[in-house]
Image: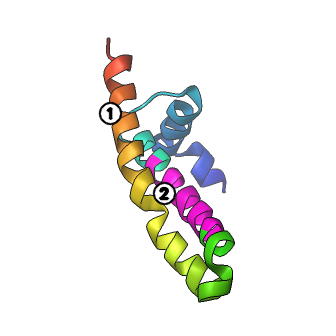
């Protein structure tokens, strides 16, 4: 664990991530975080909408697959807009 904290690459990454800097690595981490959260939200929404028709597992599976379909383009577009606005 101490090697992770003293590694200069990881230290710089965590510093820029916590400071709110938007570069390639922090943007990728935000993209992965948004995708994971949209999969969880899609699974919960699928269970709420179709639990009696499809069953809990299939509804969660389909919701988890279709949840990121609308989130991924929005996150990519949002990160591009934030990067453009930050460079002005």
Task: Give SS at disc 2.
Answer: helix
Q: Residue at x 48, y 57 (%)?
A: 35
The Cα–Cα distance between marks 1 and 2, rounded to whole angstroms, is 16 Å
- Picture quadrant where residue 74 is located: top left
> Which one is earlier in the sequence, the residue at label 1 or at label 2?
2
Which is more toward the observer, 44 or 4? 44
Left or right side of 15 for 32: left
Q: Which mark is residue 35?
A: 2
Q: Residue furthest front?
A: 53
Principal secondary structure, stretch drawn in magenta: helix
The picture places residue 58, in percent across and down from the top left corner, at 56, 86
Is 56 in the magenta?
no
Q: Residue at x 38, y 18 (%)?
A: 86
Stretch of the chain drawn in magenta: 31-45
Which is more toward the observer, 35 or 71? 71
Callout 1 environment at 10 Å: few (<14), some (14 to 19), or many (20+)?
Answer: some
Left or right side of 88 for 7: right
Q: Residue at x 40, y 60 (%)?
A: 69
1 up-or-down from 66: above or below:
above
Is 42 in the magenta?
yes
Residue for badge 1: 80
Callout 2 environment at 10 Å: few (<14), some (14 to 19), or many (20+)?
Answer: some
């Amino acid at each position: 664990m101490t090697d992770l904290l003293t590694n200069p690459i990881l230290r710089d990454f965590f510093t820029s991530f916590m400071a709110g800097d938007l570069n390639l690595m922090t943007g990728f981490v935000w993209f992965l975080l948004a995708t994971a959260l949209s999969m969880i939200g899609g699974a919960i929404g699928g269970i709420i909408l179709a639990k009696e028709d499809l069953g809990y597992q299939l509804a969660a599976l389909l919701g988890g697959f279709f949840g990121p379909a609308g989130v991924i383009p929005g996150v990519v577009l949002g990160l591009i807009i934030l990067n453009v606005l930050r460079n002005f």
